[in-house]
Image: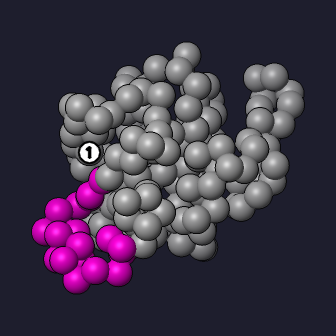
Amino acid sequence: MGAGHYVRHLAGSRWASYILRRMAYAYEIDVERQLVIVVFSADANLAEAEAVMTEVHADPRHSLRFSRVYDCRAVTRLPPLSELRGVAELFRRRVDPTVDTRRAIVARGGAPYGLGRMLQTLLDLIGLELHVFTDLDEAIAWATGEVPSGSGTGDSGGARDSRLGRER
């Protein structure tokens, strides 16, 4: 089952809703598209982000080269800046910056989107690329390379690479 189909199925199913009420996250690895999709629930926090990273890395289908989409649209809790810094630190510790992969976060508009952009900036400061979207399909298309990086598609806004002075 394709990743986009999985997430749409996951988001719309009563079973998935039940699972996400009991757990802070769910993930799927689409080996064919080389994509990991993580769906966070309403109360997800830094501990759950670390837990899902550990689970995904232990999954035999996982590869560091797979792109990632973090679907945070169901998250209702707004984390403080200190927690966003903790997420950035988690990425710094757990992600190899020499492995070229795409990371996208999908957030609702408004404050959650703004927090996503803050995380994007924090990761950019440590040399990791993250684009922020409000549309899941656009995020998946970008993450899987169906849309070139820096094209301005979606909500990523054609983020500039401050280290190289060019669009990425």
- Residue 87, compared with residue 89, is above or below; it is below
- Residue 77, compared with residue 115, is above or below; it is below
Using residue 117 as the reference point, say whether residue 34 is left or right of it.
Answer: left
**Badge 1 density bin: few <14, some 14–19, many ≥20, Cα 10 Å:** some
Is residue 89 shown to the viewer in this render? no
Q: Which residues are magenta?
A: 9-27
Q: Position of residue 7 (x, y in %)?
A: 40, 66
Using residue 129 as the reference point, say whether residue 64 is left or right of it.
Answer: left
Query: What secondary structure is the stretch in magenta mostly built from?
Result: helix
Q: Position of residue 56 (x, y in %)?
A: 28, 39
Residue beneath the point at 28% across and 80% down: 13
Is residue 26 shown to the viewer in this render? yes
**Residue 43: in magenta span:** no
Q: Position of residue 139 (x, y in %)?
A: 59, 57
**Residue 16: in magenta span:** yes
Q: Quadrant of the C terminus?
A: top right
Residue beneath the point at 36% across and 53% down: 38
In which quarter of the view is residue 53 placed?
A: top left
Residue beneath the point at 17% across and 69% down: 19
Residue at the left extreme? 22
Query: SS of the residue at dot 1?
Result: helix
Q: Which residue lies under the disc numbered 1? A: 52
Residue beneath the point at 40% across and 52% down: 37
Inspect the image, locate mark 1, and give the three-letter code of the amino acid beneath it: Val
